[in-house]
Amino acid sequence: MPTQAELMLILPELFLLGMTCALLLLDLFIAPQRKPMVHFLAVAILLATAVLTVRDGGVALESVSLFGGLLLQDTVGEILKLAIYLVTAGVFIYARPYLQARGLLKSEFYVLCLFAVLGMAVLVSAGSLLTVYLGLELLALSSYGLVALHRDNVQASEAAMKYFVLGALASGMLLYGMSMIYGATGSLDLAAIHAAAAGADRSLLLTGAVFVIAGIAFKFGAAPFHMWLPDVYQGSPTAITLFIGSAPKLAAFGMAYRLLDSGLGPVSEHWQIMLAWLAVLSLITGNLLALMQSNIKRMLAYSTISHVGFLFLALANGEPGGYASGLFYAISYALMSAAGFAAVMLLSRAGFEAEEIDDYRGLSTRHPWYALLILFVMASMAGIPFFLGFWAKLAVLRAAVEAGMVWLAIVGVVAAVVGAFYYLRIVKVMYFDAPDSEPAAGEGPNAAADVQFRWLFSVNASLLLVLGLAWSPLMSWCQRAFGV
């Protein structure tokens, strides 16, 4: 039986679960004209959960095992959960005007997102293969429903089917790998697996590790397991793409850390090589294919694959310093990705999706402030000094060098240079190309976004420069989480 102390330690997750179920029931009884209150309640639930996460004045300093090892409470998990809650709250604010203009603002959006957030919280705190899989499936099933939210749209339905079929295949591979690890070690507990790995059947354990890494690579969208990502990103409503392209990447990092370090740490010399080659494939595939895109959502999708490659540089380090760099990169990317897709939503309006790069022609003359903010976003993603993305890339490249993989760091540097081209192409279009036509009255960002959206986007994009100039506290926080 769980103790009162254990229940108090998971109070944020219990609160999130209870309030999400209450919100689901509340939607049945409120009048249609009061439906907008669901948005404010959903944001309030996430902010309250974030406050409960840091209710003691800071995140946990020591790792605590809960419920017989099923869950862990430590600084890494608390930082990731706090970031997930805040990023998702931002997603809700971004999504409201976009979905409302298209008749897609339904309570189901908020409920599915909140259940996905609960799955992420379980995933990043997992202490057992059982809770890893439960958290992952709760996240995945909610994501499938979100992608299919616009069910009358053929492109969205096709994206949802691809996501579901390939996601089921990846989940099966991950589960198969977990079964092999259980067969080799005789335990589902990650700490017990870590202790037994040194004396376990190496062939069975490493075969299981291969399948587990394949599952991790799929959830990240790493090449060659990236087939679903461009179609899902392009086919989904941009508000949904914004969600699945930001917060779940934080959860995927938490899952990778739990499985690889907490569970398979003793065989790190084997999975480090696998991750290194996955990083190379992701950097090459993502950047080369992004160069050829004219659709900005598809370009950002392929750029996500290259960003996953950079994140794998840190994971391939296999040491606390590398994981700290990976956590720093994951948080930085979540902020950049949210701002990148929000820029698309900012310029969209009912009947027009600003998804083509040519749609940004001459933006600096029509809306100079928004053009400047988008410049911040693209410069940070490209890794231009001294934006946040520059320090994030530098941190993971240093992690690769410290692991003795200088060749991998060189590949990363070349990939960063290549990647800068397609990001700066958008800046060039905004500042140096003339618009095809003048927008009609009432069109443009002011018609597409409400005050909350515009303020949040301004803060989000400006943070990429502010944190780039003052990145040290965030990096120190990540390093302390891993005892560096």
Image: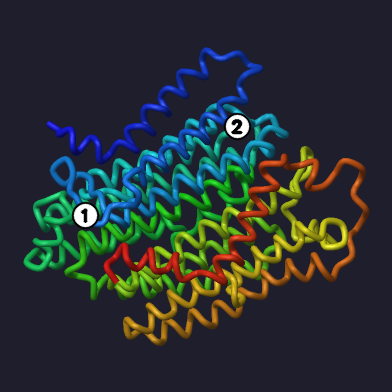
Mark 2 or mark 1, which has the lower sequence index?
1
Element type at marker 1?
Answer: loop
Alpha-carbon span between mark 2 and mark 1: 43 Å
Q: Which residue is at the front of the view, 411 or 112? A: 112
Q: Which residue is at the front of the view, 380 or 317? A: 380
**Residue at image coords 58%, 53%:** 338
Above or below — where is 60 with respect to 385? above
Asked if the residue under mark 1 is in contact with the one under mark 2, i.e. CB atoms within 8 Å, the reply is no
Q: Nearer the viewer, mark 2 or mark 1?
A: 1
Give the residue at mark 2: 151
Amino acid tagged 2: Arg
Give the residue at mark 1: 63
How many numbered marks are there?
2
Q: Is residue 203 left or right of residue 376?
A: left
Percent coordinates x, y for residue 419 in the rendering: 60, 74
Q: Is residue 50 left or right of residue 90?
A: left
Percent coordinates x, y for residue 31 in the rendering: 60, 13
Amino acid tagged 1: Ser
Image coloring type:
rainbow
Q: Residues within 10 Å of mark 2 (few under 14, many from 20)?
A: some
Element type at marker 2?
Answer: loop
**Residue at image coords 14%, 57%:** 193
